[in-house]
Image (cartoon, grey):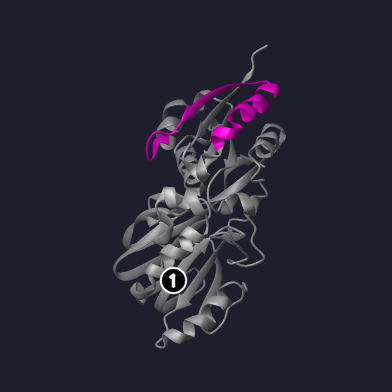
Amino acid sequence: MSKRKLLFIFNKHAGKGKIAKNLAEIIDVFTKEEYLVTVITTQHPDHIQELIAEYAIAYDMLVVSGGDGSLQEAMTGLVALPKERRPLLGYIPAGTTNDFARSIGIPTDMVKAAKIIARAEPMGCDLGCFGSEYFTYVAAFGAFTEVTYTTPQEYKNLIGHPAYYIEGVKGIQNIRPIAMRIELPEEEIEGNFIYGMISNSKSVGGVKHWPGRDVVLDDGVFELTLVRAVDNPLLLSEIIPQLFTGRSSEYVIRRKCSRARIKTPEKLDWVLDGEFGGSYEEVEFQALQKEIQICV
């Protein structure tokens, strides 16, 4: 009897390297479910995409373990394959924030996550297309977004979430308004903004309900959040709490959207799933409904 084939790719540096403590048990879980397991560790950025392009179509399931960036790499690699040739996707979270895992109900206990993957039914999950790139749960610009990819990995591994806060304080003096025009199918939004994100997650940066409380991950609709610039910096102390209520206000704009065109007078840096995602003067976003089949 031929066994199902499973390709397990993991980032050994993610989340204080905790995958090493659980690796044998994870492989045992998949083996007991009659998978023939191939294990590969990532060696450099974008390695997951390279491995998927070369090997994935020969497997029934692809399981990735790492942070949100590793998952984004996996989904980007899979979407490049013909739909009929894509293996099912499983995700074992091992990062610092694990926002996507929180949203979709994947436990941070790695062995429990493996058991769910081995036995669960797949569900269709939306994917964001951003220019020529893809993201799983958030595309963001402006204040503090650079913290997610400039904070050293060893610093995040050592102290976790506080590493982001410490690095973020250093960037307060760099906050500047960004002139922007956002063209949605139903309306156009124009103004100066200090922060914005397009998200499909129930938490961002480890904070629950930041994007709102009515988030659905497979409806083909993402959440747009924009924070207007203010003349008085003291107002920031009032605006920041408003971000976490999930509601709109004078300074916080929220919309649902399935596509958008974003224009700025100069190139603007974007962060996709916690990693640098490129600089654009004009970029188009589109939600790809149920693009990836993931086991949860």
Residue drawn at (47%, 76%), measured in percent from left and top? 227
Is residue 63 among the parts visible in the rendering?
no
Q: Residue at x 52, y 45 (%)?
A: 15
Side of 213 where 72 appears, left or right: left
Task: Please tell me how crowded label 1 is: few (under 14), some (14-19), or many (20+) other residues with Cα within 10 Å.
Answer: many
Residue 163 lies, in percent from the top left, at 47, 58
Image quarter (top left, top right, bottom left or bottom right) of the C terminus: top right
Q: Quadrant of the N terminus?
A: top right
Query: Residue 290 appears at what percent x and percent y?
Result: 59, 47
Q: Amino acid at mark 1?
A: Tyr
Q: Residue furthest front?
A: 158
Residue corresponding to mark 1: 195
Check the image and name the residue furthest to the left.
266
Q: Position of residue 183 (x, y in %)?
A: 43, 70
Instruction: Please identify the residue farthest to the top as the structure is shown.
Output: 1
Give the vertical position of 286 relative to 143 (above or below): above
Q: Nearer the viewer, residue 116 or 21?
A: 21
Region of the chain picked out in magenta, as a range: 19-47
Give SS at disc 1: strand
- At x 44%, y 62%, the residue is 140
Residue 21: in magenta span:
yes
At horizontal 68% and vertical 28% (from top left) the residue drawn is 29
In the drawing, does residue 32 fall left or right of residue 201?
Answer: right
Q: Is residue 149 left or right of residue 68?
A: left
Q: Is residue 236 above or below residue 210?
A: below
- Whether residue 101 is visible to the viewer of this picture, yes or no, is yes
Residue 166 vs 177, above or below: the answer is above
Across the whole image, how many numbered discs are drawn on residues? 1
Instruction: Confirm whether the magenta stretch covers residue 183.
Output: no
Give the camera-side residue of 270 and 42.
Answer: 42
Q: Position of residue 92 (x, y in %)?
A: 59, 40
